[in-house]
Image (tube, coloured by chain):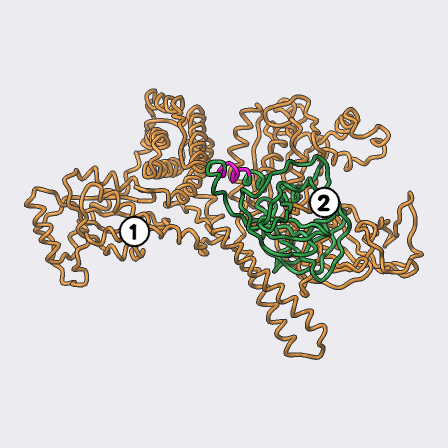
Chain colours: A orange, B green
Amino acid sequence: MDVSQYLEIFLDETKEHLQNLNTRVLELESDPENSDTVNEIFRAAHTLKGMAGTMGYKRMQNLTHDMENVFSEVRNGNLKVKPEIIDVLFQCLDALEEYTNNIQESADEGTNDNEPIIKMLNDILNNKTPDTERTKTPEPEKTPEKAAEKGEPWYDIHFDESQLTVLGEAVKQGKNIYGLNVTVQESCLLKAARAFLVFKSVEEQGEIVMSEPSAQDIEDEKFDHSFVIVVISDAKLEDIIKGAQEVSEIESVTGGLVDPDKITLGDNQSESEPVKADKKEEAKESAPAPKAGNAVAQTDASKSSNAPSKEKKAGGSKPVVNRTVRVDIEKLDGLMNLVSELIIAKNALVSASNSEQNNNGFNEQIEYLESVTTSLHESVMKVRMVPIESVVSKFPRMIRDLQKQLGKKMELYMSGEETELDRTVVDEIGDPLMHLLRNAADHGLESSEVRQQRGKNPVGSIFLDAYQDGNNVVIEVRDDGNGIDVEAVKAKAIERGTITPEQAATMTDKEIINLLFLPSFSTAKKITDVSGRGVGLDVVRSKIESLSGEVEVKSVLGEGSTWIIRLPLTLAIIQSLMVVVGGEKYAIALGTIQTIEDVAVTDIKLVQNKEVINLRDMVIPLIRLSDVLDVESTKSPEDNLTVVICKKGEKTVGLVIDELIGQQEIVIKSLGKYIKQCKFISGATILGDGEVALILDANVLI
Amino acid sequence: MEQLRTNDAIDVRDLDNKTLGENIQFIVIRLGNEQYGIDIKYIDNIVRMQHITRVPKVKKYLKGVINLRGEVIPVMSLRLRMGLDEDVLGRTTRIIILKQEQEGNVGIIVDEVKEVVTLNTNDIEKVSHGNNEDSTFFINGVGKQPNGELISLLDLATITLEDNY
């Protein structure tokens, strides 16, 4: 059976399940008695096994199978959760992740059998210590019995005469007639695809005579969560059920022998065509279903509600599975481009209106267009937004591993996982965050002994907080460790020749701390596995800057440090100030601009041969953009200067421009790879008249 | 370098059936008094000269960027790239937009676009690179036209390669 078309869903779901497993096993480690967690793990492992089996990944299936066995014992109370078991389980999850990565790269799971892990799992099973307490009664298998009690659903189906004849024939030939009741998980997104897989699996062993709802309805997803199939087969009922159960996201499959005498003859003639003939067609037709479903944004994947509900599930009977937004990025980009064009059109209208005054209807149109484009922009942006949860949820596991690796005790506290960011940013932010966390764990936190000596809690704390701040999203990585030793950094910098001792004497602590962001600068006394190889903070910074964000650090020696990452909510469309320098138009992102000042030439002072102005008791250095951009200013030297005051962190500069045009919403376009030498040009935009204007990155100039 | 390799690949195939060769279409452009050929498969578009927005602090031959139907495309002066004089913009000046897989499209300014010729690979003679930045540096072959005229075939990979020589 060709499963390649389901590969994408398989990968997505596997990753989700693995992440879920990681979180749950962590939970289990801190609360080994929680039967809900165990059940949840068991369910995830079982689904994973089924999925791997369906896709034909045998090694993955074997491993999950053994893992599932362990959980099954734990669930039945025969095995107690011990730290060693948790360790093995984590190894297991790592191995599964490796399989998944292999599959993602080559559609093949690789050849690693992971025998040592399987052996460890089996050892756990064989040496199981009987649980003397036996407080919990084993969880009853919920579904099979329940369904069986309900009375055999297949007797409710109305057969027509031709089908009865087929059934009669089958009985004469000594074949068995089975009824199957299949229930799909409520959270299942692609019921039709799952049902199709079930049909496929059943058909391998028999012939489907009838289904309720009809095959056509099932294909169209016109069924609730369960459907009934009547099969003629020589095979054993258990085998058929087993095959059907291997399909992922199938809640339960129950079955039984059908007594032909009890079958009711239906009057519903619309279903009289033999279902058997339909099957081949259905097989073909239902194939594209998952693809289409994949591209559809699940808008009801309620953004705000799923995050909190995931938090606590102590009393939860049915876990809320994270309903992800799966949107084809290409489609989104197409939509995005459309919006860009709309905005360009709007800009064209704006420039046309400037030339023709006193035209009210025209202005109304513009206002309308403006409101349309704004809301379209917002809605598209919302689709692109994903909670950072998908990135940060892997960190608790990482901290746990680091704890073992480094021999330090630490705890990770996270908040604001539901904060949303542009998809492209979320995809990129994982590595820098991971690096900062590792840094905090390795360099930041002291060992337990030192902490005790200093009167701190021997267990170190690392905080990861995310929140939205205006048009930015702020992510803070904070630790209560040693903080940055400015003197050590200074000494190191001098030793490396990065700065001279004279320079060091005049530098502020902040400037010295910023040295850490220089390439190949590490103050770690010994190089560990975790960090200290000197490829780090500079990479973090360049990555974040490539996302138009910024990173700063605050540190108090002895009390800890805070790394603050500031990222823009969106990357594609910004508000900007259009200015003219030497006859050329430039855009400056509004976010960095503080004020615009008119400065008389006489107010310019010289400090260390550099031009500065004194503005409201602040000394602000001036940058003449005409010099930076290699153009001749069109203003005469005696005229008042127009100065755009820009601020980045604590630093403020004044950019001297020739002329102001005004505020405009612009669409950022890349300059392409040829023109990358120019650091302070962050991109280009197309103006209403079709001309290209460059976007100045004030942050680089400061 | 990508293009270089493809060209080589064609040659290898031609060795197998030398007698036939393969027909390749070239656009003939004029640069000063010389004529050059550009393999048509690398050409995305030919547009008239338009306003180029200057980009500061870049290589001299990079003239800036233009707006090509909503896309921002960098434009370079082929003359300056090949170490010739500054462009003399005139009625016939055109910008040829070249397709680039890795770096995105790029435009080159030429004095004139003359015609399209079809050359057989058997009529193309390979030349090896000169080792400095004179104009032969950007040529990877010489084609013989049916009328006996010779045209130099531009090595686009080298032209669009970022020069660190």
Question: Relative to residue A72, is residue B140 depicted above or below?
Answer: below
Question: Relative to residue A446, is residue A300 depicted above or below?
Answer: below
Look at mark 2 in the image and give the residue it sits on.
Answer: B82
What subunit carries mark 1?
Answer: A
Tell me residue A52's x, y (percent): 35, 36
Image quadrant occupied by the N terminus of chain B: top right
In the foreground, A7 or A263? A7
Q: Is residue A174 left or right of residue A392?
A: left
Tell me residue B23's x, y (percent): 51, 47
In the foreground, A661 or A517? A661
Image mark count = 2
Look at mark 1 in the image and give the residue it sits on.
Answer: A284
Q: Is residue A22 left or right of residue A409?
A: left
Image quadrant occupied by the C terminus of chain B: top right
In the foreground, A430 or A209? A209
Question: Relative to residue A365, is residue A183 depicted above or below?
Answer: above
Q: Which stretch did the figure color magenta?
A: B8-14
Alpha-carbon span between mark 1 and mark 2: 58 Å
Q: Callout 2 environment at 10 Å: few (<14), some (14 to 19), or many (20+)? A: some
Q: Are marks 1 and 2 on the same chain?
A: no
Can the viewer see residue A565 in this picture? Answer: no
In percent of the image, x 65 and y 26: which residue is there? A532
In percent of the image, x 85 and y 48: which residue is there? A621
In percent of the image, x 69 and y 47: which residue is there? A675
Tell me residue A30's x, y (percent): 47, 32
In percent of the image, x 17 and y 58: which residue is there? A273
